[in-house]
Image: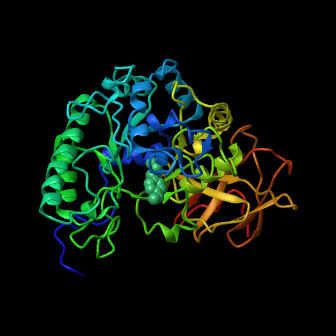
Amino acid sequence: TIALIHGAHRMGNRTDADMARWRSLRFGQFIHWGLYAIPGGEWNGKTYNGAAEWIRSWKEMPHEDYDKLYRQFNPVNFNPQQWAAQAKSMGAKYMIITTKHHDGFCLWPSKYSKYTIASSPWKKDLLGPMIEAYNKAGIDVHLYFSIIDWNHPDYRASLKNAADSAAGKRFQVFVKNQLAELLQRYPTIKGFWFDGTWDDSWKNDGAFSDELEQYLQSLHPGLVMGSRLRADEKGARHFDSNGRLMGDYEQGWERKLPATIDDVHGNDWEAVMTVPENQWGYHAKWAGHVKTVNEILEMLVKSVSLNGNFVLNFGPKADGTYRTEEQQLMTGIGQWMKVNGDAIYNGTYAGFEKQDWGYYIRKAGTDSVYMVVFNIPVSGSLRVKLPARTSLTGASVLQSNATLTPELIGRNEYFIHLPNKTTDSPVVILLKTVTGENKEKGSFEKAK
Ligand SMILES: COc1ccc([C@H]2[C@H](O)[C@H](O)[C@H](C)N2C)cc1
């Protein structure tokens, strides 16, 4: 291994209570909200085909036009209690809110910048009421913070000369001050979700990112921060130059999921997902495929089955309301989660051989294993192959509590026959297992 000062400082996952809590939540709501919701992907009658929150980089959007939008930001229909209630009914257990996206506009009245909500017609802090409403609803809040800041005069993508370096130093002080300010204003938040850390100016100062992470942890012990924040002294990001994960969880799964457990290398991880193909902020015209409730449920279940968290993104409109498609998704997902959430919360990798019908999820630290069925075979028989020395002592349909009688078809192998082959939403079966050397024979094993 290479001797590193600013590489990973820990081997393996965090084992403290704050991280265990993050791990148990499994399902989060991302909210991308800011000035970009005003144009909503359109300007001067033209449609921007990129991600709506990147419209300032579009040649058809003059920077000065974008930078004046704050004068119109006035979310008169903003109702944080309603947002929290809808997130709760969807089954989300944590929420990540954009405090400041790459455009640099702050949703809180930061004392370190003029480019904030305080300069808008709305004037008032948007983050405080959100955090209060979500916490009251029993939902943890994490703060998204973009290091890239297109508005700040001292932001540099790269440092080419002494003037750049001086600006870069001032910018680092600004970042540190804003983050400390966020922790001081919102002491109940549980973590930071950093973004915009790919430019050379950041990548080439691993020491600063390392010191910043430690500084934030000192201000707010237990803070959860993913792998997007840091670079090591060689400019490696997410994984240091020895291949070790930096930060508390792998944060690279953006609009993609690991294929198998081998892709996660035993690390905690989180996937963040858009409803359309690639829109985070509000875009008036969603082009391409819009994911359905069942597609999203499969991504959520697959993530949990592979020991990860799944975060679904929402892009509220400039007036503070959600578009219909997003409201309908929250309702549909919530209906399934209400009945089957037990399979998600505290869910972990079961260690059983993957089958085509769907995914196994083990309730952390127990012998309870859920089968979440997405693909019912034409035979109606779900194959279950158990690891050696593990046997079944019970099987039931989670929703109805109907008992199932698995058929032993081989050594540690069963068929579970589903009562009916048709369903328009994933079926969850709860398996009770027992493992050990001198275990009692499982209930369904024929007497020899
Ligand atoms: C260049 O490719 C990018 C850059 C930034 C992103 C940002 C999005 O604006 C959104 O905030 C997402 C979470 N983030 C990675 C996405 C793709």
Can residue 222 be seen? yes
Q: Is residue 114 left or right of residue 355?
A: left
State left or right for residue 196 relative to residue 407: left
Location of residue 234 with respect to 92 vertically, above or below: below
The N terminus, quarter of image: bottom left
Q: How is the image coloured?
A: rainbow
Q: Position of residue 120 (x, y in %)?
A: 36, 24
The residue sitting at 40% across, 35% down in the picture is 140
**Number of marks in picture:** 0
- The residue nearer to you, when weighing 389 against 23, is 23
Asked whether the viewer can see residue 270, the reply is no
Residue 273 horizontal side relative to residue 196, left or right: right
Residue 63 screen position, x and y as percent: 40, 44
- Vertical arrangement, residue 182 with respect to residue 256, above or below: above
Residue situated in front as seen by the camera: 390 or 262: 262
As drawn, the residue found furthest toward the bottom would be: 1
Residue at left offset 28%, top offset 60%: 230
Q: Quadrant of residue 223?
A: top left
Q: Position of residue 169 (x, y in %)?
A: 14, 53
At horizontal 25% and vertical 61% (from top left) the residue drawn is 201
Establish if 275 lies above or below 75: below
- The residue under the point 31% across, 24% down is 118
Instruction: State the quadrant of the C terminus.
Output: bottom right
Percent x, y of residue 259? 58, 67
Q: Is residue 234 left or right of residue 42?
A: left
